[in-house]
Amino acid sequence: MNTVNQKQIAKNTILLYVRMGAMLLVSLYTSSVILNALGEIDMGIYNAVGGIVTMFSFLSGTMTVACQRFFAQEIGKNNYQELKHVFSLCVTVFIVIALLVVILSETVGLWFLYHKAQTAGRMEAAKWVFQLSIISFIFTIVRTPYQGIIIIKEKMKVFTYLSIAEVLCNLGVALVIDNYSNDRLILYAVLMMLVNLIISLYYYLYCNRFYEECKYSFWWKKDKFLEIFGFAGWNMIGALSGICKSQGLNMLLNMFFGPAVNAARAMAYKVFTTVQLFADNFFTAVKPQILKSYSSGNTPDMLKLVMQSSKFSYYLLFLVSLPILLETQPILDVWLKKVPDYTALFTRLVVINALIEVLANPLAVSMQAYGKIRNYHLICGSFTLTILPISYILLKMHYPPESVFYVSIIICAIAIWIRAVFVKHSVGLSLKQYFVKTILPILAVTLITTPLPLYLEMTINSGLNKFLLVGTVSVLMTSLSVLTVGMTGTERKHFFETVQNAIRRNRHEHE
């Protein structure tokens, strides 16, 4: 990885962590206010009913990956006229996908709402939530190509500002419904739809203002469409497996246990998405470099980035996950006024799942860069899809709700190695190097870090002092083990040079 790429990744990562810091504080407070305002049942209904619409997001998810790959390809070639054509074609396809989502939602989705979903006597409000979720989701679909251009062009400052604006709008929504006396669930759905509209409109206006290639004009070329859609078609299996694992399990929990369990799952996933930001922000900065490295024919650099980003994504996630895993209940007690049943257990399980799945992203992006993904998605996607039927069978056999999370953890862990084997045969990843340079350091850091914080958690009486001590020791032990056994000598040297340069720049700015 050359120096320019390292500087670009570092700069983009810093911007994304500014975004994360603001989002972390605001979104956690917002979630607490919303749960208190709506209550467990209405919160669960919103999560479950909105999830019915989100089930169809695998259609847009496949095209999102395809668009970003083909955008990066044309940018890598400096072919901006062709980029404009590809962008316009992608927008057209997303409009068609939005229409398909409406049709599926108003047929299959409505059937599920009326005949399978548990709404605890709140069917009228659930209908409103369902229709408003459809409208909101359409805005999300249509803005995707514009968001993709900003990410591929590595304009993380814009992405940061818009993300912060979105969480601030969500905070405003929470404060409004907290002071509303009528049906808060319906008002919440209306306001969330309006927030989505405003953010989507800004993406559109910004891209049209600053990027000539984003000025939409209808363009059609059958060969290019088939190339993009063919790539997206095989991605559909992978996207479908991801949706089934998240929203499919959410719907199963609603069918078997009702909206109260959906509320517990929603709060657990709020923690999940919050901690995952630590890894996602870093990888969002790295992803364009992986795609561009392959497009420019620099496969060795791409493979190096894949292994490094896998390792450091895990470290960043583990840094915040270990205190949460050890002190889950005290954290939830401080965060929420009333903690729904199962929330602590669900939270621990989804965080463990996140630590496993963080390794999948770099491998998946390297396959996207390669482009020949049929067999990859047929096997990996089909294997991951087994989470849903296995979970259904267990719930029919009267297993408890947490069993679906155990199934997900086991399947996702096996899928990592399957992905690595595909990357080996596709772009030359050495499984031995991947194990030695990525998996072994991860295992070493985990095994060295965990015992002392775990001992403190088990031996000290509950209280604020215990919470602070366990959290502090967890962070210090993780940092030390990453620096000593988790990095190579070259990585450690580069890390200290980056810190020293940042300190020097800070001093110069204040002189």
Image (cartoon, rainbow, N blue to C red):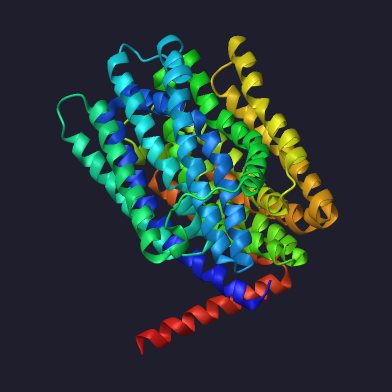
Residue in the foreground of this view, choosing between 284 and 200: 200
Is the residue 75 above or below the residue 143 in the image?
below
Q: Dividing the picture into quarters, in which one does residue 78 lie?
A: bottom right
Foreground pick, 225 / 338: 225
Residue drawn at x 25%, y 27% is 186
| Residue 428 on image: x %, y % | 83, 56
Residue drawn at x 43%, y 43% as measured from the top left:
142
Residue 326 or 36: which is nearer the viewer?
36
Q: Residue at x 65, y 40 (%)?
A: 235
The image shows a total of numbered marks equal to 0
Asked if residue 66 lies left or right of residue 435, the reply is left
The answer to which quarter of the image holds residue 244 is: top right
Q: Is there any visible trace of residue 500 in the rendered image?
A: yes
Q: Which of the two residues, 114 or 466, is positioned nearer the viewer here?
A: 114
Q: Position of residue 495 (x, y in %)?
A: 61, 73
If the image is split into quadrants, where does the N terminus sit? bottom right
Q: Position of residue 165 (x, y in %)?
A: 32, 54
Q: Is residue 253 left or right of residue 263?
A: right
Viewer can see residue 460: no
Q: Is residue 366 left or right of residue 135?
A: right
- Which residue is pictured at 34% across the width and 39% down the height? 31
Quadrant position of the C terminus in the picture = bottom left
Q: Where is residue 393 drawn, in percent x and y?
A: 64, 14
